[in-house]
Image (cartoon, rainbow, N blue to C red):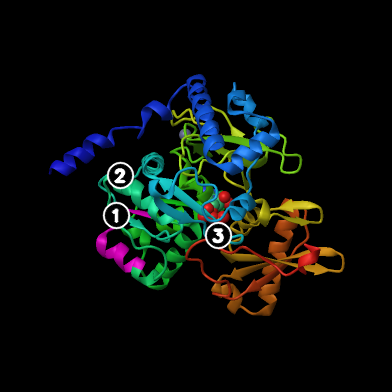
Amino acid sequence: MATQSRAAKEDSRKYWDEKFETMPTAELQKFQLRKLKETVAWAYERIPFYHRKLDEAGIKPSGIKSLDDLAKLPFTVKNDLRDNYPFGLCAVPLEEVVRVHASSGTTGKPITGPYTAEDLEQWTECMARNLWAAGVRPDDIAQNAYGHGLFTGGLGFHQGLTRLGCAVVPTSSGLTERQITLMKDFGATALFSTPSYALTIAERAAEMKVDIRELPLRVGVFGAEPWSTAMRQEIEERMGIKAHEAYGLTEQGGPGVGFDCVAQDGIHLNEDHFLAEIVDPVTLEPVPLGEKGELVFTALQRRAMPLLRYRTKDITRLRREKCPCGRTFIKMDKIFGRSDDMLIISGVNVFPSQIESLLLEIAEVEPQYRLVVRKKGYLDQLIVQVEAKKEVYDAGPARRLEVAAKVMAHIKGMMGIGVDVELVEAKFINRSEGKALRVVDERPKQLR
Ligand code: ADP
Ligand code: ZN
C-alpha cells in the first residue's frame, strides 16, 4: 500500500526535474556557460589530447567568455576516440572509473565510454527525465528489451527505470518468443527496445496468435537507430501503445541525451548536460538556428570523458520554440539519418528513413526493407528490397511486378529519384533484434 500511495502522489508531477526542464532560456544559457568553462578547463588540464588541440587552435580555457566562443574550440571525431583507444581520452585515473561501456560498433571498431560515479548518477537522472516525459510511472511493469551489456541502451534504461521505481524486467534483446510470453505472463505495461526490434516483436506475436493490443502494454520508449514518424505510427497501431523516443550516443554517455514529450513532435535535448550545435558537414561552420546539418555536442557535466564539440554524423535541425509540454529545452527534429548512411542517387541526398516513410504508405508491402547500392556504369543504382504482404506475393509474378511498379512510381513521385524495386517474399529481410541494417553497399570500395 505504501508503495502505491507513493506512486500515486508522484504521478501528479508533470516533470521529473522541473527546475531544469522548465528553466527560462537565458538562465539556462548562463548555467551552460558556467559549465562549459568548467568542462573546457577540466579537459585541458587532464587530457593531453585536448591540451594539444586547444594549444594548436590558440585557445585557452580562460578564452571562453560566451557561448559563442564555442566555435573557437576544435572538433572531436570518432577517429580521435579510435586513435586514443581504450582510455587515452579519460580525464580521471581508472580508480575513479566505475563503469566502461563501448559502442555497438555499427560503423567500425568499437569506442569506449568510461564513467565516474557522478557520471552514472547524471546519466540515470537524464534517463529518468526521458522516461517520465514518456509517461512511464513507478507502477509500470517495465520490459527492457534493449541489449544488456557493453551497449549503453540496456543499462541506461535499466538505471532510469530503477530510479523511477518501476518493476524492471531485464529481458535484454533476442529470444523473441520468450519476450512475448513474459510480456503476457508478467502483464508488462511498458516496453523498451530499438524500433526495429519492437516491430520484430509485434510480428512474431501476431504469428503466435498473441494480440499485443489486448495486453496491458500501453507505452514504449524506442531509440538507438533512425526511424520515421510513419514507423512510429505503425508500431503504435500494431501494439496499441504510445511510442516515445530516446536519443543518445555512447560518446556522450548513451541514451538520455534527448527525448520526446507528449507532443511527439521533435526531441528535447537535456541542455543542462549537452550543448548542441548544428554545423555544415562540409565547411564545418555553424549554421543558423533552424537549418539542417550535422549535430555536434559538447558535454557540460561529464567527468570521465568530457568530449568537446563531438561530431555525431547525425543529420537534423534544431528548433527553439514553445512546446505544449512546457519544457524549455531546445528541440531537434527526428534524426534524418547518419551521414554514413546517406546515399547520393541522381544527385539527390537520400536517407533510408525517407524511403521507409514512403514504403509505409503502400498497403501491399511490409515495413521490412533494405537498400542495396550497386554501380551501373558510372552511376549509382539504388535497389529497394521490400517484403510483399503474403497474399500479394502469393498472387504471382504479374501482381508482384504491378506492386513493384507502384512502389517505384511512389518514390519517383515523392523524391524525384529513379530506383529499382525488388518485391521479396516474407522473411527475406533479416529480422532485427537491435539496430537494423538498412544499407548494403555493394559498390567497389574505391568507387564509394
Ligand atoms: P554506434 O555508433 O555503434 O551505433 P551507439 O550505440 O553509440 O553506437 O549509437 C549512437 C547512434 O545511434 C547515434 O549517433 C545515432 O546515429 C543513433 N541513434 C540513437 N538514438 C537515435 C534516435 N532516437 N533516432 C535516430 N538515431 C538514433
Ligand atoms: Zn515538449
SS for dot 2: helix
SS for dot 3: loop
Residue closer to the observer: 383 or 32? 32
Picture quarter with the N terminus: top left
Counting residues from the start of the chain, the first of labels 1 and 2 encountered is 2
Q: Is residue 221 magenta?
A: no
For badge 1, the amino acid type reads Val
Mark 3 CB in 8 Å range of ligand 1?
Answer: yes
Q: Residues within 10 Å of mark 3 (few under 14, many from 20)?
A: some
Is residue 287 shown left or right of residue 191?
right
Looking at this view, name the residue that lies furthest to the right: 378
Residue closer to the observer: 199 or 349? 349
First to last magenta residue range: 179-191
The residue singled out by tag 2 in the image is: 163
Q: Is residue 305 above or below residue 365?
A: above
Is residue 52 shown left or right of residue 103?
right
Q: Is residue 84 above or below residue 58?
A: below
Mark 2 CB in 8 Å range of ligand 1?
Answer: no
Residue closer to the observer: 135 or 281? 281
Q: CA distance from mark 3 to mark 2?
A: 29 Å
Is residue 135 shown left or right of residue 88?
left
Mark in the foreground, 3 or 2: 3
The residue singled out by tag 3 in the image is: 110
Q: Give me the disc on residue 168.
A: 1
Q: Is residue 170 visible?
A: yes
Image point (63%, 74%), residue name: 424
> Where's residue 222, x and y in %?
46, 52
Mark in the foreground, 1 or 3: 3
Q: CA distance from mark 1 to mark 2?
A: 10 Å
